[in-house]
Image (spheres, rainbow, N blue to C red):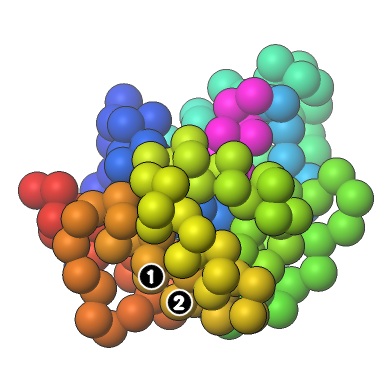
Amino acid sequence: ELGEMSLKDIDQVARTAFPLCMRHLFDTLREDHHLKHGGRMQLGLFLKGVGLKLDDALAFWKAEFSQKVGAERFDKEYAYGIRHNYGKEGKRTDYTPYSCQKIILSTPGVGDHHGCPYRHFSEENLRAALGKMGVSSRALDDVIEKAKTKHYQLACTLTYEAVHGSSCDAGINHPNQYFSDSQKILE
Ligand code: SF4
């Protein structure tokens, strides 16, 4: 079981330990102060999985969405969905974070930022995003090659290895696994 994730650490942790799919959602949320439903679900459940408590999750999303839609509209339209993810509304199901397989098979539309970048980004955007992650130009070609041949999780595993300079023999099959394995290396 992972520990708690504190709000003050979240930006640093996002830069060092989030897989590309979550890093992209996180950065987009910080930039646009908004994410559509699919992105809120994918990132929200991931953050819950890394140990962000409900009160901190509400504060985190509110700080961003308030800048776009105002605090009142956030409370009215968006807070419910976050409490729902934590099993505090509706059927009170304790929803689990999405696996890579589920994310890879999702179908993001225009204006959506969820999905797996290795599958859903153009090559140009993927190259730019990987550069931002700190993947060297040599490793980058290998990652792109894996993505092109539809080995998305292998592409993610190679990214992990390039970023951390450490092997990941089990491969990446869940964003929260990418996170916890990264945390172990960074500790
Ligand atoms: Fe996220 Fe999995 Fe795609 Fe990596 S392979 S970016 S963890 S969905």
Residue located 48% across and 40% down the image = 131
CB atoms at circles 2 and 1 under 8 Å apart?
Answer: yes
Which residue carries the number 1 mark? 157
As for residue 157 lying within the magenta part, the answer is no
Which portion, as a residue range, is magenta?
Answer: 23-31
Could you say where residue 29 lies in the image, as x and y percent from the top left? 63, 33
Query: Identity of the amino acid at label 2?
Result: Leu
Secondary structure at numbered mark 1: helix
Quarter assignment of residue 178: bottom left
Residue, x 28% and y 62% (percent of image)? 161
Q: Is mark 1 within 8 Å of ligand 1?
A: yes
Q: Position of residue 16 (x, y in %)?
A: 31, 42
Q: In which quarter of the image is residue 67?
A: top right
Dominant secondary structure (helix, strand or loop) of the stretch shown in magenta: helix
Would residue 37 appear left or right of 151 to someone viewing this image? right
Neighbourhood count class around disc 1 (C-alpha, 10 Å): few under 14, some 14–19, many 20 upward: many
Mark carried by residue 154: 2
For residue 9, side relative to residue 56 (left or right): left
Q: Can residue 67 be seen in this view?
A: yes
Evaluate whether residue 51 shows in this view.
no
Pick out the residue farthest to the right.
110
Q: Where is residue 98 in the image (x, y as percent from the top left)?
A: 55, 71
Q: What residue type is labelled 1?
A: Thr
